[in-house]
Amino acid sequence: MMRHGFVLLTFCATLMGCVVAPAQERRPIAWDGLGQDPNRPSGVKRRAATQAPGASDPNQERERVLGTLHPYSAAWWAIHDEIEAENDRQLGTKLVICPRCVPSSQPPSNDVTGSIR
């Protein structure tokens, strides 16, 4: 009986070693926007996400002009495309994509899986 207890105690001690493993390197965690941001250190106040008073939205004037043009005319589409390009540019400055997640411009290698058709 004492032998079984010793084996059980050794097994539990081994499992505790796995549980108490050293912490891995701290890396940013993907956050879906719900709840508290796990990447933000606790105790840090969040600053307001408002723009500086001197900085104005470049699309504001374009949207005003867009409202005066005939819908779906050539000029309307030109202004619309400028607005969309500016929105994409602003999103690109805020969006961070993991370099490993984006395929590189190198030619694909032979170890890529795909359809056999």
Image: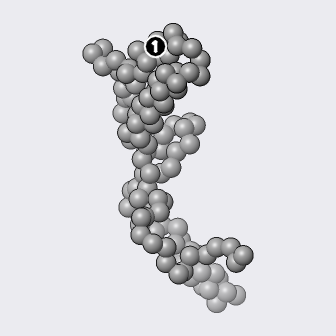
Q: Name which quarter of the figure residue 104 lies in.
A: bottom left
Mark 1 crowdedness (10 Å alpha carbons): few <14, some 14-19, many ≥20 = some
Nearest the viewer among 67 and 11 is 67
> How far across and how far down the image is residue 76, in percent?
52, 21
Residue 52 visible:
no
Q: Residue at x 47, y 51 (%)?
A: 29
| Tally of numbered discs | 1
Residue 93 location, x and y as percent? 37, 39
Q: Which residue is mark 1?
A: 65
Residue 85 visible in the snapshot? yes
Q: Name the element at disc 1.
A: helix
User: Is residue 46 placed above or below 40 in the rendered structure?
Assistant: above
Horizontal placement of 51 versus 36: left or right? left
Nearer-the-camera pick, 42 or 67: 67
Quarter of the image with the N terminus is bottom right
- As shown in the figure, which amino acid type bears the numbered disc 1? Val
Q: Judge whether 78 appears above or below 106 on screen.
A: above
Q: Which image quadrant is residue 55 in?
A: top left
Q: Quadrant of the C terminus?
A: bottom right
Residue in the picture at 50% in, 49% down: 30
Going 47% across and 63% down the picture, which residue do you hit?
Answer: 103
